[in-house]
Amino acid sequence: MAEFLGILSWFLVSTVKFVVSVGALLSFSSRPWYFDMMIVMSGGITGVIVFTYLGAIISKKVSKYHFFKIKYKTIRKLIKLKNGYGLMGIAFITPVVISIPVGCIFSASIEHNKLRVIRIQAMSVIIWSAVLFGLKGLFNVQIVP
């Protein structure tokens, strides 16, 4: 039962903070790397699905009000990224730099095709999971001695 709750907690953490769960599982987990990769990957994809549809609802509600002005550096950087690299650029940095909820809500606000957002964001989560956990699996990299 304790093992199940541990897996469930890392699954839920990875829906919101992908990098935190990857770092913790790479450092302290005694399970095989591919099992941890599946936990984090499935949690990240679940977060992408939930926050893409939730982000669409939130952006519709907020867009009715014109009190939101872009004056923060982070939002300006996201706008520059969107203009320069589009949805692919946002999806590339979402799991590791910005969190999954922020990236999916921002992506859902600029792209109306939710299935496209989910596909691109999920592919980004899969690639980052494979890269980060693959380093441990292929080269047997140990973060903590």
Image (cartoon, rainbow, N blue to C red):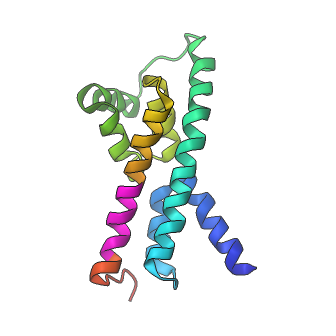
Q: Residue at x 30, y 30 (%)?
A: 86
Q: Position of residue 114 (x, y in %)?
A: 50, 31
Snapshot quadrant of residue 26: bottom left
Q: Residue at x 32, y 32 (%)?
A: 77
Q: Depth check: 31 or 93 in front?
A: 31
Q: Residue at x 65, y 73 (%)?
A: 6
Q: Is residue 131 magenta?
A: yes
Q: Position of residue 16 (x, y in %)?
A: 56, 51
Q: Is residue 42 left or right of residue 98?
A: right
Snapshot quadrant of residue 8: bottom right
Q: Give the extent of the magenta segment.
A: 126-135
Q: Position of residue 69 (x, y in %)?
A: 47, 17
Q: Residue at x 72, y 80 (%)?
A: 2
Q: Depth check: 123 or 144 in front?
A: 123
Q: Which residue is farthest right?
A: 1
The answer to whether 117 is drawn above or below residue 28 in the figure is above
Q: Is residue 61 magenta?
A: no
The answer to whether 26 is drawn above or below residue 43 in the figure is below
Q: How many discs mark residues in the rendered view? A: 0
Q: Position of residue 65 (x, y in %)?
A: 60, 11
Which image quarter is the C terminus in?
A: bottom left
Q: What secondary structure do most residues of the magenta stretch adopt? A: helix
Q: Depth check: 60 or 122 in front?
A: 122
The answer to whether 5 is drawn above or below residue 50 in the figure is below
Q: Which residue is farthest left?
A: 84
Which image quarter is the N terminus in?
A: bottom right
